[in-house]
Amino acid sequence: MAADNALIIGLIAANFAPENRKKIIAWGVAAAFVFRVIFAFGATIVLENPFVKILGGALLLWIINNLRTDFFGGKKVRSPTLKSKETVSFGQGVYQVLLADTVLSLDNVIGVVGAAKDYYYLMIAGLLLSVFIVLTLASYFANYIKTHQWLGYLGLFVIMIVALQLIIGGLINLEILSINSKFEPLFNI
């Protein structure tokens, strides 16, 4: 589940010069850890609130649209070594990473807390493992996406699926939407 965090951090960082790319990844990993700790303590409230799920999904869709226009639009970085060619400021990149980390940490914590049940040592181990995965994969994704643009499209598609799962799961919890019981596990985020 941490791969979605790493992927979106990589997508955002890929548009920046190498120096700023490392800083954005560092901010993203630190934020992923902090948000996971905060959400882990409030997991029972988060799990019960469908409005948080719907809002999180909507925020993810907004992030996907911004990433799509920044990353795949006509104003891409032509020379990855010049900071002056970056189409988005460093501050905007950090903001996008923090916002994405907030939403994606939520689904990660829900999965880890749900799997750990009342075993807090398992929850802590799972959260630490997920942050380690984000740390190792984000740099890889950022570098790989620069030369293989198809992965960026795939990443946006995966994040879109998570967003739709959050929104549909929230609507199911509010009993606005009902689905076949065979498909309920897909939306129990």
Image (cartoon, rainbow, N blue to C red):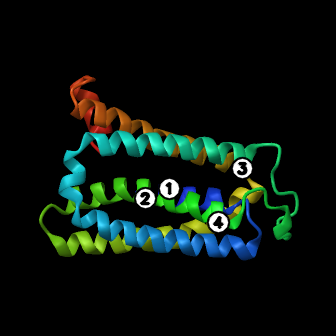
Q: Which residue is drawn at 82% across and 65% down?
A: 80
Q: What residue type is labelled 3?
A: Phe
Residue assigned mark 4: 91
Badge 4 crowding class, 10 Å Cα cut-off, few under 14, some 14 to 19, many 20 or more, is few
Q: Nearer the viewer, residue 87 or 29?
A: 87
For the C terminus, the image quarter is: top left
Please determine whether, in this image, residue 22 is positioned above or below residue 90.
below
Give the distance between the C-alpha atoms of the residues marked 1 and 2, in whole angstroms: 5 Å
Residue assigned mark 2: 102
Residue assigned mark 3: 71
Badge 1 crowding class, 10 Å Cα cut-off, few under 14, some 14 to 19, many 20 or more, is many
* Labelled pair 1, 3 in contact (Cβ < 8 Å): no
Q: Which SS class for mark 4?
A: helix
Mark 1 vs 3, N-terminal side: 3
Badge 2 crowding class, 10 Å Cα cut-off, few under 14, some 14 to 19, many 20 or more, is many
Q: Residue at x 21, y 26 (%)?
A: 175
Q: Which SS class for mark 3?
A: helix
Residue assigned mark 1: 100
Position of residue 160 in the picture relative to residue 14 (left or right)? left
Number of dots carrying numbers: 4
Q: Which amino acid does label 4 sit on?
A: Gly
Q: Which residue is drawn at 78% across and 56% down?
A: 87
- Nearer the observer: mark 4 or 1; the answer is 4
Please determine whether, in this image, residue 42 is positioned above or below residue 30.
above
Q: Which SS class for mark 2?
A: helix
Where is residue 60 drawn, in percent x and y? 49, 45
